[in-house]
Image (cartoon, rainbow, N blue to C red):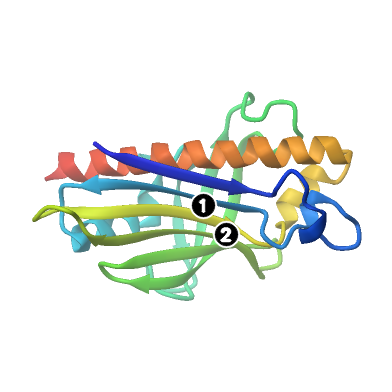
Amino acid sequence: MAIETTVTTAPEDASEDTSNSGSVIDSPSLFGSRAEIQVAASPESVYSVVSDLARSGEWSPECRGGEWVGGPPSAVGTVFRGRNERADDVVGWAPVVRGTWYTEAEVVAAEPGRTFRWAMRTADGRRQESVWGFDVAPGGAEGTATLVHHFRMGRATEGIRSITAELDEPARRRFVAEWGAKVEADLAATVRRVKRVIEQQG
């Protein structure tokens, strides 16, 4: 099993990428991560699994599942309401949400056998620059697929701004670095679990 992961977070000196406040939180490109793995299944089979967000509890470190609302499952424009859980020791010093909480996301790309992406929404239903997705392509061997799980956050979401609102700048930079590392680890764990689920189901 080969896994390749890369992560980029806001640079140590983010002054060139921030607004007049000079805060790392105002970077126009706050997080970006990806994880890649080979799966012994066709791209179409892989897509059919990863595009079913209601099954996320089978592979996500935090999402325990949820339901489709406001449209047909896995279709562009449809909203998914997810149920999430986070342990107390995840970036434990920062005021992040713990326990169970709910989020809404809108499907923004759905190309069977190729790509599936969803954007997180604000409390009042607006899309944020926080996009998760899976890209699928034929693998290096017959009957296999390359699966890439990726995440990008441009401008900070309302959740990130709430978490960092009372932090000083050194603490904000620490949070961005540690949260970026957490996301990288989560993506790698997710693709490993997706691979196991798909290959075990045959």
Residue 15: x %, y % from top left: 82, 54
Q: Which residue is mark 1?
A: 82
Residue 133: x %, y % from top left: 44, 59
Q: In the image, 83: left or right of 29? A: left
Q: Is residue 126 visible?
A: yes
Any mark on residue 52, and which?
A: none
Q: If the image is split into quadrants, where does the N terminus sit?
A: top left
Label 2 or label 1, whichever comes before in sequence order: 1
The answer to whether residue 82 is above or below residue 197 is below
Q: Residue at x 49, y 36 (%)?
A: 185
Q: Amino acid at mark 2?
A: Glu
Q: Is residue 97 visible?
A: no
- Mark 2: secondary structure: strand
Between 151 and 166, which is closer to the camera in this rendering? 151
Q: Residue at x 36, y 54 (%)?
A: 148
Q: If the image is split into quadrants, where does the C terminus sit?
A: top left
Q: In the image, 16: left or right of 31? A: right
Between 132 and 70, which is closer to the camera in this rendering? 132
- Mark 1: secondary structure: strand
Q: Amino acid at mark 1?
A: Gly
Q: Which residue is mark 2?
A: 104
Between 142 and 123, which is closer to the camera in this rendering? 142
Residue 31: x %, y % from top left: 62, 52
Sort mark 1 into few (<14), some (14-19) or many (20+) by Cα contacts within 10 Å: many
Q: In the image, 101: left or right of 55? A: right
Instruction: Spot the residue most to the left.
Output: 142
For marks 2 and 1, give the CA distance: 6 Å
Whether the residues at callouts 2 and 1 have beta carbons within 8 Å, the answer is yes
Q: Residue at x 17, y 42 (%)?
A: 199
